[in-house]
Amino acid sequence: MVNKFMVKCLIVYFSVGGTTKKVANKVVAGLESVGYDVDLHDLTGGVPPSIENYDLLGIGTPAYFVSLPFNVADYLKTIPKLNIPFFSFILYGFVIGEGGNRLRKKLTKKGGRDVGYLKTRGREDFYGFVKSGYVLFPNSPNAEDLERAENFGKNIKSNIENENYISEEFDERPPFMFRFQRAINAKWITHSMLYKMIKVNKSKCTKCGICVNICPTHNIVMDDSGFPKIGKDCLGCYYCERDCPEEAITSILDTKMAKPILKYNENLIPKVVGDNFERVQLINGKVEKI
């Protein structure tokens, strides 16, 4: 049962580019303003603390191929029977998909009570879009988004105290083509096949280590010769390829089989995001506005 005098909250989030972290910090500010004690944990920093000593759980994540990043989904599996309230927030730059739905359904099935769901736009600079010359919602989350995140945190207290509170509706199921993209980027495919298609051109590689440092799952290490070695614990974010200053890394996104999907997504940009995009080019591992 939630202690109404002092609630101890754990927020576990995943952020690579820093946008989910910005929202998480604002949610924390909102919770602390109503007297909650909050611990914030980034999944890139290791295993989160046990939820046994907490009265409230929050999960923050970006959308990933219209679903959840593998590491967020894996964390949800480790959570035991919940029996406490939970809230969630998700950032997306293209199609939100069913990541928020899956997260909420899993935690509800474990016995948690859904007391809040926030979805907000976030900068979408996935390499597939950058490769096509786009960054979507380049300035998101903006000041208005961050204010909403702080108010969301403040409102969690009243949501918990309201026994009749009903959380937000679930998001619509994405169209078939996006479900197909999710399927071909499933964890078992990524960990058995797609990671093997990430190649390092040793004649271009300068052993700078940028790819090692950018990898959110610490999946890239230097081999005995000082060259990057790709492990199988890959998320398929392809930040390693995007940020390589020597263009020494290639992946499935550079193959003929990926071109129709990249083009399909590119053609939908105006319909899905309107004019909320920038035209960009990738120069020496840096995304630069044209």
Image: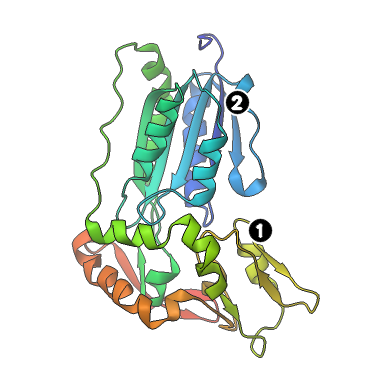
- Residue at 46% x, 29% y is 30
Foreground pick, 284 / 56: 56
Foreground pick, 252 / 285: 252
Residue 204, percent from left and from top:
64, 88
Q: What element carries label 1?
A: loop
- Residue at 60% x, 84% y is 246
Foreground pick, 172 / 177: 177
Whether residue 140 sits left or right of residue 266 in the image: it is: right
Quarter of the image where the C terminus is located: bottom left
Color style of the picture? rainbow
Residue type at mark 1? His
Identify the residue at the far right of this view: 224
Instruction: Measure the alpha-carbon separation of dots 1 and 2.
Output: 24 Å
Q: Is residue 255 above or below residue 167?
A: below
Q: What element carries label 2?
A: helix
Residue type at mark 2? Ile
Write down the residue under mark 2: 51
The answer, for residue 150, to whether it is visible in the render is no
Write down the residue under mark 1: 218
Mark 1 neighbour class, 10 Å CA radius: few under 14, some 14 to 19, many 20 or more:
some
Residue 104, percent from left and from top:
39, 33
Q: Considering only order in the chain, which callout, 2 or 1, is on the residue closer to the N terminus? A: 2
Q: In this view, does 13 lie above or below 10?
A: below
Instruction: State the mark number for residue 141.
Output: none
- Residue at 31% x, 49% y is 97
Q: Quadrant of residue 11?
A: top right
